[in-house]
Image: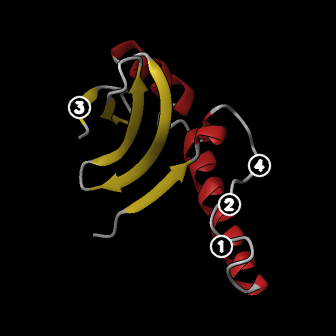
Amino acid sequence: MDIKVIVFSAIALAGTAGLLLTGLGGSGSEHREDDAEGHEEREHAAVRSIGQAGDILSLEQILQTARQQHAGRVLETELEEGRGGMVYEVEILDANGEVWEMKFDARSGELLGEEQED
């Protein structure tokens, strides 16, 4: 089974609807940049569609739960489709400088697991 991974930047997590593309400027052809933008836009549209259908909790709800576990700055989120359904992964940098990765069931918001990154 293929796993789709959708990565949101910290800026996108703050509610910005625009795209943040890094590492593309000046290092490739304009055609590759357009392809990357189109792919990113299709992924964002797919996530919005799933969320609007009510199949999963909103990213804001998941982040609220994640911050209750570990207060801090969100570094990265991913939404994955796997065997057991949709899963949010959230990485947070806490006040002590520790990075925590947490996995949440995207439908229920249940914390499936967490680990401290090295």
Determine whether label 1 and label 2 are within 8 Å by CB. Answer: yes
Q: Position of residue 100 (x, y in %)?
A: 31, 31
Q: Circle 4: is it few (<14), some (14-19), or many (20+) Cα within 10 Å? A: few
Element marked by disc 4: loop
In primary-sequence order, the first of circles 1 and 2 is 2
Which residue is drawn at the image coordinates 73% and 70% (left, top)? Answer: 25
Quadrant assignment for the N terminus: bottom left
Residue that mark 3 sits on: 114
Residue 93 tag number? none
Q: Alpha-carbon distance for marks 1 and 2?
A: 8 Å
Element marked by disc 1: helix
**Circle 2: residue type:** Leu
Q: Residue furthest top?
A: 68
Q: Is residue 111 left or right of residue 22?
A: left
Q: Is residue 75 above or below residue 46?
A: above
Residue that mark 2 sits on: 21
Location of residue 81 by image quarter: bottom left
**Circle 4: residue type:** Gly
Q: Which circle, 2 or 3, is nearer the viewer?
A: 2
Q: Position of residue 101 (x, y in %)?
A: 31, 36
Q: Is residue 15 left or right of residue 94?
A: right
**Circle 1: residue type:** Ala
Residue that mark 4 sits on: 18
Residue that mark 1 sits on: 36
**Circle 3: residue type:** Glu
Determine whether label 4 and label 1 are within 8 Å by CB. Answer: no
